[in-house]
Image (cartoon, grey):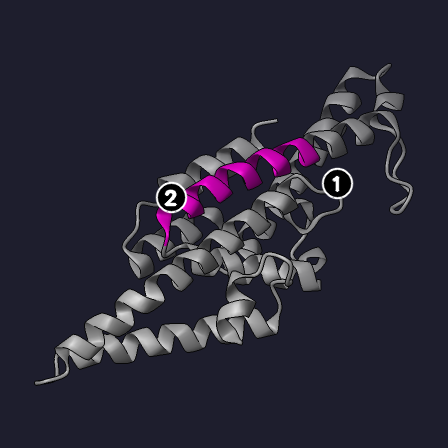
Amino acid sequence: ADTQIMRSGDKPLDDDFFTAFERLEQVRANARHMLNSTGQQTSGVDILHETSEILEASYERMFVWVQQQCRGPRDAAVSKSTPSDLETPAGAVLKRVLKLLVQRPVYYNHCLRDIARVRKQALLQRFLEALSQGDSSFGARAIELQACEPVRYAGDMLAWIHEHVASEREAVAALMGLAGTVDEVTCERAASDGMDSAPTIVSVEEILDI
């Protein structure tokens, strides 16, 4: 049953999938332990060999799911503008998937680049809307209404950018399941995972470069 859940692209990435994935990881951990046990090396190798294809199929499913999210509607989880907006079922799945894909750097880095591209587009769109339409939910008028007053016009644009850059940093940190500023996130990931933090830095810079 677990094998079908993890392989089938028709089934959602839900609690059943992640539970099955955890069980598979535990089986493989036990097999690696067997490699160090006298007389059980062959069994451990067999188990690792038999489960490796299932494991890779699971990682591929998660990678494909993120790609689908990046090609989805504007209100998809990858485009959410604040950490609280990510507190949705899809947002929770996205964070779990990214945490697991760290173990597959090729998939993980590809996902970061795509998410950065989507979030950059979403942030730019929100900026253009703030210029021309304002934000009715906060009662904010269109910034372009102040165009006749250059100092105030420029000040309003800078204030919007300052506010939303801070929000974007927090959202990216929440999306990656980490807390703190972008610099802290970068350091924590480099320290905890022993991985090159450059993709994280590049992604955040690309998002904020509007």
Left or right, 126 with respect to 1, comes to right
The span shown in magenta is 104-123
Quadrant where the C terminus is found in the figure: top right
Is residue 105 among what the camera can see? yes
Report, in whole angstroms, how far the alpha carbon at label 1 lies from the one at label 2.
Answer: 25 Å
Name the residue beneath numbered marker 2: 106
Is most of the magenta stretch helix, strand or loop?
helix
Mark 1: which secondary structure?
A: loop
Determine if the magenta segment contains residue 114.
Answer: yes
Q: Which mark is residue 74?
A: 1
Q: Residue at x 64, y 62 (%)?
A: 12
Q: Amino acid at mark 1?
A: Arg
Residue 53 x/y as whole percent: 37, 60
Query: Is the C-beta separation of discs 1 and 2 under 8 Å?
Result: no
In the picture shown, does residue 191 fall above or below 31? above
142 sits left or right of 58 in the view: right
Q: Nearer the viewer, residue 163 or 178?
A: 178
Give the number of the mark in front: 1 or 2: 2
Residue 95 in the image: state x and y as whole percent: 55, 59
Image coordinates for residue 59, horizontal then vertical, percent: 45, 56
Q: Which residue shows up at 46% across the image and 40% down it?
A: 110
206 to 22, vertically: above or below: above
Was residue 106 drawn as part of the magenta stretch in this picture?
yes
Relative to the observer, which residue lies in front, 71 or 204? 71
Q: Amino acid at mark 2?
A: Val
In percent of width and height, residue 57 lies at: 45, 57
